[in-house]
Image: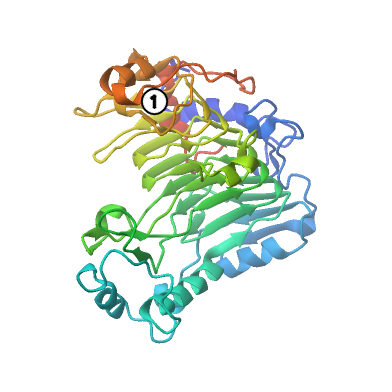
Amino acid sequence: MLALAGCTALVLSVTGTAAAGENRHDAARQALPANDGWGSYGTGTTGGAAADAAHVYTVTTWAGFKAALADGGSAPKIIKVKGTVDAVAEGCDSFAAPGYDFDAYLAKYAPETWGLDTDLSAEPDDSPEGLRRTSAAAQDTAIKANIPANTTIIGIGKNAGFKGASLQIKGVDNVIVRNLAFESPIDCFPQWDPTDGATGNWNSEYDTAVVYGSTHVWLDHNTFTDGSHPDSAAPVYFGMLYQQHDGELDIVRGADYVTASWNRFTEHDKTILIGNSDSESTAVGDRGHLKVTFHHNLFSGLVERAPRVRFGQVDSYNNHFVAETGYNYSFGIGKESQLVAEHNAFTLPDGISAAKILKRWTVSPLTADDNYVNGTLTDLIAVHNAEIPAETLESGAGWTPALRTGIDPAKAVPRIVDCGAGVGRLR
């Protein structure tokens, strides 16, 4: 691969393997290749590859997309997305309850008048908070789309995708999402919580994609971004950033056997969460699950959670991480996590130490071998422990990934991934 000249030749090479199989010439009918990460475990992930002609759809609108999802139940289906499908085409005002007024909301709940000791949960329905709740419920219904089992959703060409949508892959098996650009949904009605932290905070809903209790999911050659609504452009109210984004991808509530390959995750804060709670009630369903593979993904311009892991056996290899101003960490080591992070490349600017790549939330051993930082082989655990001794990390995740189709040299990963990852680069 190193001898190839230019991205075009390289993309043709690296994506050709992923396209192997009897349907190699029809991307819409491609299944996840054998041994390609946790998503290939057991029955594998075929999505809608077996769909008959009656269950192949081309959609250009949000209403058309939802109708295609609902048609035919869980029979195998292929939904081809053409152009940008906007789930909030009529704007945030279309969800607002009669009488809702953001200026009135700010006036009533300003810390200097409301204080920081009482949350807003007891506010009546006709209060500014009550009207906000009603408005938020309308948006929730409108922008969430439930993806049925045995479904492939794939973009046509290089510019297909969704804006303002939240895909809910919830309680189903066998879903493929490929070649789509996702502009993260914005929460039109974030909630102010005076009791969140010492000075209160704004809390938002809506992940771009949620894998909730589902199995055998493949996300491939997608681009996830905040697009026209970056956090850097968000206003400040009550001294806190008016946060309108949640995660780009959450994998939670006992979800299992997920492969995320050749995606771009960009311009976001809380990017990927695997396991959403340390609570024992949640842990009962998460232990032994949350098996996820990330390979050949580009993580750039992010703040944190690439990913943050609880419980799961997560394999992250051959990914490229590019840090910018505001970077916090890449891998979050959470409760009972078993992370293997190998053969990755990190590009850090001056002033950001390799010690920040790992962030310890609880003591959970991990494996972190053959990783390169700015072209230099770096022991991420040793660097972290030397500079942050109060949060010592332990080596040895306790398992060895077996589901890999091939490993590229870590030093070559920046070029390979930057050329091949994201929407419009599927061959």
Residue 420 is situated, as x and y percent measured from the top left of the image, at 47, 32
Residue 209 is situated, as x and y percent measured from the top left of the image, at 53, 51
Apparent side of residue 219 relative to residue 324 in the rendered image (left or right): right
Apparent side of residue 22 relative to residue 311 in the rendered image (left or right): right
Q: Residue shown at 50%/18% (left/top)?
A: 408
Please state which of residues 170 and 225 is positioned toward the viewer in this rendering: 170
Please state which of residues 383 and 425 is positioned toward the viewer in this rendering: 383
Apparent side of residue 76 relative to residue 206 in the rendered image (left or right): right
Dot 1 amino acid type: Pro
Tell me if I can see residue 380 in this picture: yes
Residue 192 is situated, as x and y percent measured from the top left of the image, at 34, 65
* Element on which disc 1 rests: helix
Q: Which residue is label 1 attached to?
A: 414
Location of residue 44 with respect to 10 vertically, above or below: below
Residue 237 is situated, as x and y percent measured from the top left of the image, at 24, 65
Location of residue 333 with respect to 375 vertically, above or below: below
Location of residue 255 with respect to 61 vertically, above or below: above
Location of residue 397 with respect to 179 vertically, above or below: above
Quadrant assignment, res 301 = top left
Q: Residue shown at 29%/61% (left/top)?
A: 242
Picture colour scheme: rainbow
Tell me if I can see residue 255 in this picture: no
Q: Residue shown at 52%/30% (left/top)?
A: 337
What is the quadrant of the C terminus in the image? top right
Neighbour class for label 1 at 10 Å: few (<14), some, many (≥20)? many
